[in-house]
Structure formats: structure tokens, C-alpha cells
Amino acid sequence: MIMRKLILAAVLVIACSVSSSAQSGYAIKAPTGYQGHLEHENIFFPNSHNGMAFSTTHGFYYSDNVFVGLGLSVNLYDEDGMFMVPFYASAKYLFNPVAKVSPTLQMRLGSFLYEDDVNPYTDLALGLRFASHHDFAFSLMLSGTYLGSFSYERGYYDSHSGEYSIEKTEYPFSFSLRIGIEW
């Protein structure tokens, strides 16, 4: 009876030490203080147009889980060199900040400039953060973006009818695949 208790205690001690050493291999220190983010997006619109964006966001981790910052993006589209410049406030939540791989939720709220207009910009992204250190990580996210009343007008000449026409395309929302780095 005593021998069984000693063997059980030894097994529990070994299991606990193996478990804690295995978990330490998968844990990092939570991010703190200033963080900068650089991100690239491939943008897809429901009407089959595409684009890409480059953004930078700078801010602070106010707790182990919550990042808040300000950012700027340059979005380029496949329509005759069309682009827009969103500026935004960003909030990011890390579900498990000490894990090397953590689910992440990010929201951006702001405006964008297009021609002489200022329009609302809202972005919601869900993805994964792959951390190698507490202050260095890669991220992979899927996002949905609302672009307010963003539209593009293009004029063209129809050689069959001999008329000049204007085609207007609406871009109210888009989806994107975003990859990024933070330091």
C-alpha cells in the first residue's frame, strides 16, 4: 500500500515537471509597452475586383491582452491606378498573450480620403498571432472592411454605338487576407 502511494506520488511529480517544462516551451512573456505593426493585405471585392494594401499601426499594449494604436494605410486597386488612404484607430485583443500561437481579434475605426471626400472606414479581422518573443510576432488574419459610400466612375467610348458612357462601380465592402509583423 505504501509502495503504491510512493509510486503514484513519483509519477505525479514527474508528470507535473514534464508538463511544466513542456508548457514553458510553448509560453512566452506577454507583450508590453510600445508596439509597431506593418501589414500587407490582398483585397477582394464581391464584384470580382481586387487590390492590395500596406498599413502601419503604432501604439501600446495597455494590458497583457489589449493593444490600442493609430494607423495609416495605402490601398491600391486594379482600376486605372485607383487608390485611397484610410487613417484609423485600432484595437487588438489577444486571447492568450503568453502562447506562441494565439487567436486575435482586431478592429479599426476611422475615415479614408478619396478624391475630395472623407468617408467612414471600419474593419474587423480575426486571425492568429505567431510570437517568437514577447515583442516580436507574425500575424495572419481574415478581415472584412466597410468602405462607406466608396464608388469609382470610369468613362469609355463604345465604338459600336458611337456613344461615350460612364460606368459607376460601388465598393461598399471588401474581404482581405492580411499578413503582418509586429515588433
Image (cartoon, rainbow, N blue to C red):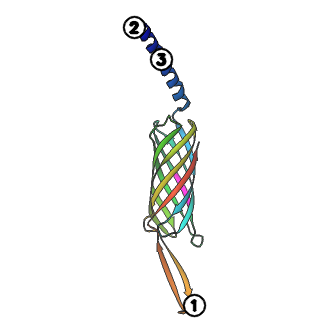
**Residue 63 sits inside the magenta stretch:** no
Report which residue position mark 2 lands on: 1
- State the mark number for residue 11: 3
**Residue at disc 3, secondary structure:** helix
Q: CA distance from mark 1 to mark 2?
A: 98 Å
Residue 95: where, in percent of width, then height?
44, 40
Q: Amino acid at mark 3?
A: Val
Label 1 or label 2, whichever lies nearer to me, is 2
Q: Which residues are magenta?
A: 71-75
The relative height of residue 42 versus residue 180 in the rendered view (above or below) is below
- In the depicted view, which residue is nearer to us: 31 or 111? 31
Q: Earlier in the sequence, mark 1 or mark 2?
A: 2
* Residue 75 visible here: no
> How many marks are shown on the rendered structure?
3
Q: Position of residue 25 (x, y in %)?
A: 56, 30
Question: Which residue shows up at 56% across the image and 39% down it?
Answer: 131
Q: What residue do we see at 42% from left, 11% from top? A: 4
Q: Are marks 3 and 2 in contact (CB under 8 Å)?
A: no
Q: Nearer the viewer, mark 1 or mark 3?
A: 3
Callout 2, which amino acid? Met
Seen at 48% across and 37% down, the residue is 97
Q: Please, what secondary structure does the residue beneath circle 1 have?
A: loop
Q: Majority secondary structure of the magenta segment?
A: strand
Tag in front: 3 or 2:
2
User: Which residue carries the number 1 mark?
Assistant: 159
